Image (cartoon, helix red, strand yellow):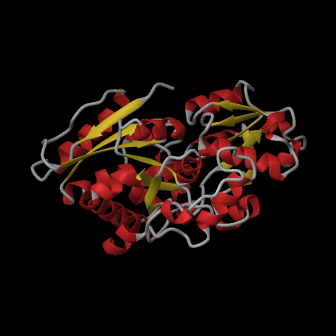
Amino acid sequence: MPRRSVAIAVATFTAAALVTAGCASKVSSGTTSQVGASGGQKVSIMVGGLNKQIYLPFMLAERLGYYKDQGLNITLSDEPAGADATTAMLAGQVDGVGGFYDHTIQLQGVGKKAESVVSMLQVPGEVELCRSDLKGVVNSPADWKGRKLGITDPGSSTDFLTQYLAQKNGVNPSETSRIGVQAGSTFIGAMTNKSIDCGMTTEPTVSNLLGSGKAFVLADMRTAQGSQQALGGEYPATSLYMSNSYVAAHKDVVQKLVNAYVKTLAYIQQHNGTEIADQMPADYYAGVGKAAYAAALDSEKGIFNPTGIMPASGPSTCLSVLSAFQPDVKGKTIDLASTYTDTFVKAAS
């Protein structure tokens, strides 16, 4: 899947209709361009799959005008692989990443410092699907030995979680083949063509495959109960994370970003799936249809963090998961307190 980028300029002189129409077209065009006036503080954020429902707050905040309200000029770029987004941040190509919190722990293990400034998902929102023809053959991750497992990309959070589920169920991750198939059409194609046996993905890809009868659910981490069963506790996922040095040097900008996201998280809790879908670009639900997209949102609304505060036991669960298999983390001393901060969320509240 080619990288898609969308630059969204948010300023007080921009008409809401122009922002809405321009942004929708840019998401699907594969180009990077500026929409609207050039005023406002510039911030660049790379998101690990903008059209995935687990990353909904990043685009929804723009569609609702919340960046504009904060006087921010935001560039959102779409990078399907969270690991690549993290690399871009470390290289100074972007200011922050919309991705899973667990990357901040992994980064500390290799001597890099990044922190989540707002927690957007209380649970991963990920689903492990297997091909329908394997029903009764693959009954749990314990049956994964020798199997081809779809992940977003090597080093992604889906890679982390897949390895953990394998190891937890008695299968050494090295006994599996983990294949980067991203999400959406490429994931669906990999499963349809039997390039993978099982794979971890999110909505709306999940609804597409279940609706077509091509897959069944092996593990569902869209609920607290499902996450507890699979991972042993709360596993905070989507967040905005930035290098600790950027946060320290740009506290005013970070506060404005967090203000926008806390307001967006409240909007998600106060509106149903149809109302939220009405705000989103049409290509976000093109693969499954608007009704199915909205229904999926309604069914998994519990994944979204209503406050933005880091779940109390979440960091320790993430550390336990990564320590089970991740060589960058296993056996290392990790200072969890420096991998996230609730300071900006509390100020926004």
Which quadrant of the figure has residue 134? top right
Q: Is residue 64 visible?
A: no
Q: Position of residue 115 (x, y in %)?
A: 46, 56
Numbered-mark total: 0
Q: Is residue 171 visible?
A: yes
Please state which of residues 226 and 246 is positioned toward the viewer in this rendering. Answer: 246
Q: Residue at x 79, y 39 (%)?
A: 173
Q: Residue at x 50, y 43 (%)?
A: 289
Please state which of residues 267 and 3 is positioned toward the viewer in this rendering. Answer: 3
In the rendered image, the residue lying farthest to the left is 13
Q: Residue at x 88, y 42 (%)?
A: 143
Q: Position of residue 241 (x, y in %)?
A: 44, 53
Q: Position of residue 226 (x, y in %)?
A: 71, 62
Q: Position of residue 343 (x, y in %)?
A: 38, 70
Q: Is residue 28 above or below residue 305?
A: above
Q: Residue at x 42, y 54 (%)?
A: 240
Q: Is residue 200 above or below residue 62?
A: above
The quarter of the picture where the C terminus appears is bottom left
Q: Relative to 111, is 252 on the left or the right?
A: left
Q: Relative to 220, is 298 on the left or the right?
A: left
Q: Relative to 171, is 4 on the left or the right?
A: left
Q: Relative to 293, is 200 on the left or the right?
A: right
